[in-house]
Amino acid sequence: MMGCFVRPTLPLAALLLLGGCSLFRASTAPVPETPEQRLCRQEASRSPAVLELNRERNAMNQINDLRLDRERDQRFARAFQDCMRARGFGPPGGVEPLIPR
């Protein structure tokens, strides 16, 4: 008789355990963009380093297209960080090394 009660409660206990774990998960809500970030994103997307990659684009060559997409992302990130630094904001998540003046 006791085996009949153990089996149904085991899946229920597992579901409760998994449900409880989701209560302590980190929030994935997007952080609102600051006006400086918005301005720097616009500036980075119009940067000459990013725009010059369009001359190399060949719609018939998918490998070239993928390479240029990765290169564009890297150049955009670099231009964005340069813009933010110029406005006095360092990169997120750490301490920027001291630059002698």
Image (cartoon, rainbow, N blue to C red):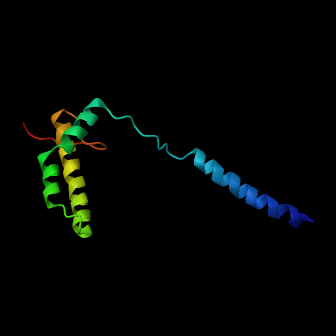
Pinpoint residue 18: horizontal percent, then vertical percent.
64, 54
Q: Quadrant of the N terminus?
A: bottom right
Residue 25 visible in the snapshot: yes
- Give the farthest residue toward the front: 60
Quarter of the image for residue 72 reads bottom left
Left or right of 18 on screen, residue 72: left
Residue found 28% across the figure and 30% down from its top: 35
Depth order, front residue of 73/89: 73
Residue found 65% across the figure and 50% down from its top: 19
Residue 81 visible in the snapshot: no
Quarter of the image for residue 4 reads bottom right
- Residue 35 against residue 60 in the figure, above or below: above
Q: How many marks?
A: 0
- Give the farthest residue toward the right: 1
Q: Quadrant of the C terminus?
A: top left
- Give the farthest residue toward the left: 101
Pinpoint residue 40: horizontal percent, then vertical percent.
22, 37
Depth order, front residue of 62/15: 62
Pinpoint residue 68: horizontal percent, then vertical percent.
21, 60
Depth order, front residue of 53/2: 53
Residue found 14% across the figure and 61% down from its top: 56
- Residue 80 against residue 3 in the figure, above or below: above
Pinpoint residue 10: horizontal percent, then vertical percent.
76, 61
Residue found 13% across the figure and 50% down from its top: 49
Left or right of 9 on screen, residue 67: left
Depth order, front residue of 2/8: 8
